Image (cartoon, rainbow, N blue to C red):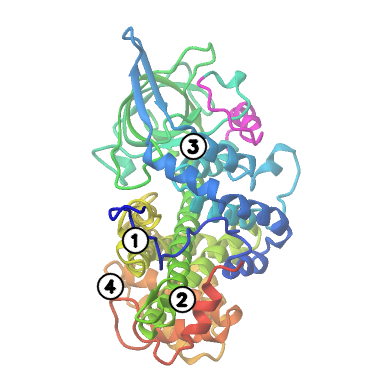
């Protein structure tokens, strides 16, 4: 006999969003990869997309975030350990991404003198990152930093020779031991200090030569870092004040004699999101490090790393937005309310289609930026990379939290509880807008390009002018940008407005050229013209919302 207290049969709930191929199910991603030069990797991306979208992969992500890392400062006898312990699920995510080459795939040609980069390598790698971050976001921090550190190390060949062979192995080795005994290595970064933050020239950490000094030489580092993520990396690129000014150093966990370097981790940050990833405060108690490049040239030395991490911020935000959107559409396709599926209600169609426009535009713009990384010898691509990296990071990362919130609301109360993905995505998405430069920093970087490299702006504006074609809204938007550029007194106050204007017109040109008319028309009509709006689900009453949703819906 059934007890009257037995929970009733569960009806009218969407099935779990899992066992979906994150590559083949995503029209926008597959089209962007092919369009921007990464199509040769489609077979590998298909296999990786299946792995990242599996139920087992999403379960790894859950476990890694529900069991965050712990700092072990001392052993049972009082000896310093300064080690971080992770849940096995975190290590499984790391092993999967490293085996796929997300930490080095764009740079493996550097292992062979004279070898040329694989065409489309950055696009293909970014597509994998776009999917891996949907599986689990926190482990992508050391992956991103390792990838972005390679061009910095290449500036100092003697240091690169000792470290890059371990980076290029595609083997994840979590062991805490000197690099000589490891199968693979990861590289972190420490730039910001509590008194300066983004203003790294205010850093007070000091670096004194252990001998004669100079490029590749050993220095003694004393000071702190307020944020140093992924503290269990094997080595770190850090900034410190040498006698010749702010300089870049490679600071390993172990010294050449096998002893542990003097990194003293004070605590792990208790963060809003990104909980599977350890972010630390650290003190350097006369730690040993080796100079990369010249003294006083720390920012120019490390800027390539910063640029690479900013690309990953945009790609990562686009990937997380895609997961939020896909989950919302999946839920609305299965949930019935008021005698029909949620996805069939006109108001819900407005919301889902509106979200889909931003996700497609963000993905298109981010992968257009990836292409410029693959074609750095092309002056037009180089100009796009320099100007549009801060623009793309600014706009794409700013979209993320709003998309995550609205997608969560599509799930109702189911979205707000921790059992599902929506809450974790909502906590995760603000990070990329903050990490590697907040919105104001990106706007200021854009303004620096305008002031110091006006020829870069000329090239990008020429390219945009050639692609707006006869579309009156795109042309009018580009004209408004020209007006802004000719009012230099107001540019600093308008830095954010200019970044957003450049991003939306660039995204609009890509969609006009490559997306279905229903998508391009709706995006241009609502983002580049039309009435002002502050929330999703407005202004698409004349758009083909069903077609837009069908394009964004996960394919089987």
Q: Which residue is mark 4?
A: 490
Q: Nearer the viewer, mark 4 or mark 3?
A: 3
Q: Which mark is residue 1?
A: none
Q: Helix or strand or loop: what does disc 4 sit on?
A: helix
x then y, percent, for residue 165: 66, 31
The percent coordinates of residue 263 (x first, y second) are 38, 22
Q: Which residue is mark 1?
A: 415
Question: Badge 2 is on which residue?
Answer: 357
Residue 434's x, y, as percent?
34, 52
Q: CA distance from mark 4 to mark 1?
A: 42 Å
Q: CA distance from mark 4 to mark 3?
A: 50 Å
Lower sequence index among marks 4 and 3: 3
Mark 2 vs mark 4: in front = 2
Q: At x 39% / y 85%, what residue is drawn?
A: 346
Which residue lies at the image location 38% right of the left edge and 82% below the top edge?
A: 339
Residue range in magenta is 155-176
Residue 89 numbered mark, or none:
3
Say if mark 2 contacts mark 1, CB within 8 Å.
no
Counting residues from the start of the chain, the first of labels 2 and 1 encountered is 2
415 or 307, which is in the foreground?
415
Number of residues whose C-alpha sits closer than 10 Å to that of mark 2, classed few (under 14), some (14–19) or many (20 or more): many
Task: Note whether 494 is above or below 444 in the view shown.
Answer: below
Whether pointer 4 and pointer 3 mark residues with C-beta atoms closer than 8 Å, the reply is no
Extreme residue in the front direction: 1
Mark positioned earlier in the residue sequence (2 or 4):
2
First reached walking from the N terminus: tag 3 or tag 1:
3
């Amino acid at each position: 006999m059934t007890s009257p207290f037995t929970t009733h049969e569960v009806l009218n709930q969407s099935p779990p969003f899992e066992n979906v191929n994150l590559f083949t199910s995503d029209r926008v991603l597959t089209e962007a990869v092919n369009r921007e030069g990464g199509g040769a990797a489609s077979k590998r991306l298909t296999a990786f997309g299946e792995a990242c979208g599996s139920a087992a992969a999403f379960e790894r992500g859950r476990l890694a975030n529900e069991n965050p890392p712990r700092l072990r400062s001392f052993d049972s006898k009082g000896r310093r350990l300064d080690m971080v312990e992770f849940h096995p699920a975190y290590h499984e995510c790391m092993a999967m991404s490293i085996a796929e080459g997300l930490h080095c795939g764009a740079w493996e040609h550097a292992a062979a003198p004279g070898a040329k980069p694989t065409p489309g390598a950055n696009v293909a790698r970014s597509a994998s990152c776009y999917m891996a971050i949907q599986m689990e976001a926190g482990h992508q921090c050391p992956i991103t930093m390792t990838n972005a550190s390679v061009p910095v190390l290449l500036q100092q060949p003697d240091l690169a020779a000792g470290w890059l062979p371990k980076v290029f192995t595609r083997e994840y080795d979590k062991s805490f031991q000197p690099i000589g005994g490891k199968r693979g290595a990861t590289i972190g970064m420490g730039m910001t200090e509590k008194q300066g933050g983004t203003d790294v020239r205010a850093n007070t950490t000091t670096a004194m030569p252990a001998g004669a000094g100079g490029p590749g030489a050993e220095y003694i580092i004393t000071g702190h870092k307020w944020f140093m993520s992924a503290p269990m990396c094997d080595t770190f690129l850090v900034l410190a004040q040498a006698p010749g000014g702010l300089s870049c150093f490679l600071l390993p966990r172990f010294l050449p004699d096998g002893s542990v370097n003097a990194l003293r981790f004070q605590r792990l940050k208790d963060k809003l999101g990104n909980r599977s990833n350890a972010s630390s405060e650290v003190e350097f108690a006369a730690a040993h490090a080796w100079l990369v490049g010249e003294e006083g040239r720390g920012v120019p030395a490390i800027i390539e790393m910063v640029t690479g991490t900013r690309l990953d911020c945009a790609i990562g935000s686009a990937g997380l937005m895609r997961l939020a959107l896909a989950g919302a559409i999946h839920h609305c396709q299965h949930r019935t309310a008021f005698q029909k599926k949620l996805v069939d209600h006109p108001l819900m169609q407005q919301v889902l289609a509106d979200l889909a426009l931003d996700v497609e535009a963000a993905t298109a713009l981010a992968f257009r930026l990836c292409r410029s990384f693959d074609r750095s010898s092309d002056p037009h691509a180089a100009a796009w990379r320099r100007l549009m990296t801060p623009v793309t990071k600014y706009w794409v990362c700013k979209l993320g939290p709003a998309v995550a919130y609205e997608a969560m609301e599509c799930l109702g109360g189911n979205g707000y509880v921790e059992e599902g993905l929506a809450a974790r995505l909502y906590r995760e998405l603000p990070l990329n807008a903050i990490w590697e430069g907040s919105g104001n920093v990106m706007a200021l970087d854009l303004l620096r390009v305008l002031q110091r490299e006006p020829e870069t702006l000329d090239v990008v504006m020429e390219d945009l002018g050639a692609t707006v074609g006869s579309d009156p809204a795109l042309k009018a938007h580009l004209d408004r940008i020209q007006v802004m550029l000719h009012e230099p007194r107001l540019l600093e106050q308008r830095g954010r407005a200019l970044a957003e204007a450049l991003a939306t017109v660039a995204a609009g040109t890509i969609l006009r050229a490559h997306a279905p008319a229903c998508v391009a028309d709706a995006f241009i009509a609502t983002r580049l013209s039309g009435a002002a709006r502050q929330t999703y689900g407005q202004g698409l009453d004349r758009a083909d919302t069903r077609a837009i949703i069908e394009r964004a819906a996960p394919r089987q």
